[in-house]
Image (tube, rainbow, N blue to C red):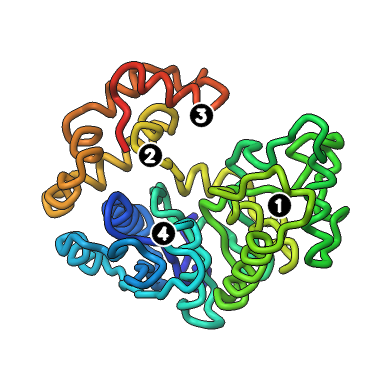
Amino acid sequence: MAATADDIQSFNIVVIAQGGRLQYEAVLFAASLRAMSPDFSGRLLIAEPQPGLLWQGDPAIRNPECRALLEELGAEILPFECHHFGSSYPYGNKIEALLSLPEGEPFVFFDTDTLILDSLSRVPFEFGRPTASLRREGTWPEIELYGPGYTRIWKSLYDKFRLDFDSSLDQGYPDEFWRRYLYFNAGFFFYECPRIFGQRFLDYALAIRDDPPPELVCQSLDPWLDQVALPLVIHSLGGGRDTLPKGLLDGEVTCHYRLLPLLYARESDRAVEVLEAVSAPNRIKKVLKSHDAMKFMIYHGRGRKVRALFDQDDLPRKEQAIRNRIKRNGFWMR
């Protein structure tokens, strides 16, 4: 049964857009949101980093046709300043942008490389109990021979911020198996106030970057810093891994595809159908064809050739193996 107006939650959506690929991905995101979730009544905020001392060039949306089309699709461009990250760690945009969002208004952050596949009214967000994407691999930490294990590394971070470590563990997995520890992909997350979430995210990320516990001495924080800090933020705000029903976000309602070759290789038939449908209107095609990967993958059929390389019901277990097969066949594009 379709949701009524009284049932539909009110919240804002924020994605990051800047010059290069992200401005075109933002167009795809906005187009899929309007087409697949027409009952969404909140604000779509496109957070745009502004030039400054921390950027080597101008990070803003440089294609005026992208900007105009985003506004036509009902998006609001939200400029924000970078005071801590910039070119050295562009993933920090998702942290600093939150501090420019409307205070006290629930929000959902999505990575720009996301498609909306169905109505967001299907997702029963509990904005006071945040969570993030569980579609991830065990990318951090990388355990070194004779170095500390998962428990010592993660516990050192919880201790640093005076958080209860034991209550964060998934007791269904054994000690020293990565899934036992709270770890997310930062492709989406939400909370009841972006300023509270953003300030804590910033405070934790800077503290980890600038004064890491000794247990992290062998660990790389680039590009993992946001995903190291994120579970600590979520745990500190009363959230966890199970505050949403499974299978909606990163499933039937949204698709975090990462890059178009990966979308065609491994995502559902529904994701491919939505991608090609929302990119088909002439006003959208005219803009997206300015980006080579979209031009060749979507409009010149290269994506369908990538899809033919894989059995979507029997995919390689590791993403790197998928990437390698696409590259060997000469179809890789970013």
> Nearer the observer, disc 3 or disc 1?
3
Residue, x 55% and y 53% (percent of image)? 186
Amino acid type of the residue tagged 3 in the rendering? Glu
N-term-proximal mark, 1 vs 4: 4
**Residue 62 % position (x, y):** 21, 62
Please indicate whether residue 30 sits to the left or right of residue 169 in the image.
left
N-term-proximal mark, 1 vs 2: 1
Find the distance from the CA under tag 2 to the CA under tag 4: 21 Å
Kindly state the secondary structure of the residue where label 4 is placed: helix
Q: Few, some or many C-alpha atoms within 10 Å of disc 2 (few <14, some 14-19, many ≥20)?
A: some
Amino acid type of the residue tagged 1 in the rendering? Asp
The residue that mark 1 highlights is 242
Amino acid type of the residue tagged 2 in the rendering? Leu
The residue that mark 4 highlights is 87
The residue that mark 2 highlights is 259
Kindly state the secondary structure of the residue where label 1 is placed: loop
Amino acid type of the residue tagged 4 in the rendering? Ser
On screen, 143 above or below 324?
A: below
